[in-house]
Amino acid sequence: MSDAVLQSYLENQLERITTALESLTPSAETLPAQLHEAMRYSLLAGGKRIRPVLLLAACEAVGGENEAALPIACALEMIHTYSLVHDDLPAMDNDDYRRGRLTNHKVYGEATAVLAGDALLTEAFIHLSDPARTAAIPPQTLLEVIHIMARCAGSMGMVGGQVVDMEAEGKEIDFATLEYIHTHKTGALLLASVKAGGLVGGADAEQLESLTRYGEAAGLAFQIADDILNVTGDKEELGKAVGSDEARGKATYPALLGVAEAKRRAIELRDLAISALEPLGEAAQPLRDIAHYIVNRSC
């Protein structure tokens, strides 16, 4: 699809996801009011929503109805947002801005930010396990989706990657450690997006394998693109400080390989992701275009 068509597709999905998130999250007037206000502050702050969009697109790619997948997509965005709230804390990355405005702890204080993140993670599993919202999904499929999302978010996925990322700050690391950080801290939840979407859409074993290979490659490409943008982008584009990775001695592709090689690797991964979708035919076109979009941000 053309850039204009892709932009229209992304905007339509973004509107659906945002509307659903607004309705699923407790109002800022519901007690405890400040906690719910803090949750909504970060969850409804905008952003690309790439994880839930990928989930819906994967569902469509295997012939599923993505309306059934929408609550799952929203739960995934809650998990992602909780990780950002915690990632910004002084104990971790100590960031002042996220998506162009003050980070959660700068507005509500560190204690409330911790609890808002905890509540968003828990809220995700409330919706994943809500019979009223997941009735259209076969119980065994839903159980598999919950397992994938929990595993990819925990110590064997995103949280594990964050720990190794912090341990690597200011140190010389090898390429294997760098890939571990990227595939776990960022790639795991992106992989969970497409696998969960495929399962909800009724993917067979071959279709799920194609989506898995796509998710592995696209997830790593996404983080490499972010690494590059932290070097070459601008604050307005990123919504946060540029050069922060280098200042903290973060393990990144540009730091280890240089910007040119990082761009080459991102393009290579994009092409791998797209080739993995060949068995899915035309229905997977949005996923192909999203892979281009992910990498074109920095290359």
Image: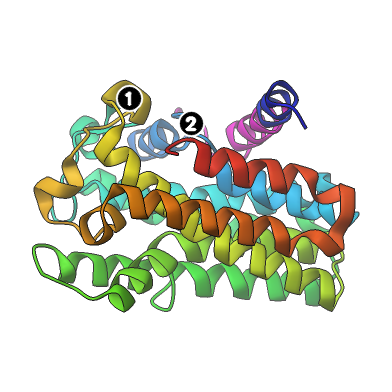
**Residue 141 appears in which quarter of the rendering?**
bottom right
The amino acid beneath tag 2 is Leu
Q: Position of residue 163 (x, y in %)?
A: 25, 70
The residue located at (71%, 60%) in the rendering is: 275
- For the stretch drawn in magenta, the main secondary structure is helix
* Element under disc 2: loop
* Position of the N terminus by quadrant: top right
Q: CA distance from mark 1 to mark 2?
A: 13 Å
The residue located at (15%, 46%) in the rendering is: 94
Res 82 seen here: no
14 falls in the magenta region: yes
Front residue (pair 163, 72): 163
Crowd tier of the residue under label 1, counting other residues whose Cα lies within 10 Å: few below 14, some 14–19, many 20 or above: some
Q: Which residues are magenta?
A: 12-29
The extreme right residue here reads 63
Res 88 seen here: yes
The residue indicated by pointer 1 is 100
Q: Position of residue 266 (x, y in %)?
A: 47, 53
**On residue 181, which mark appears?**
none
**On residue 44, which mark appears?**
2
The amino acid beneath tag 1 is Gly
In the image, residue 27 sits, relative to residue 157, either above or below, namely above
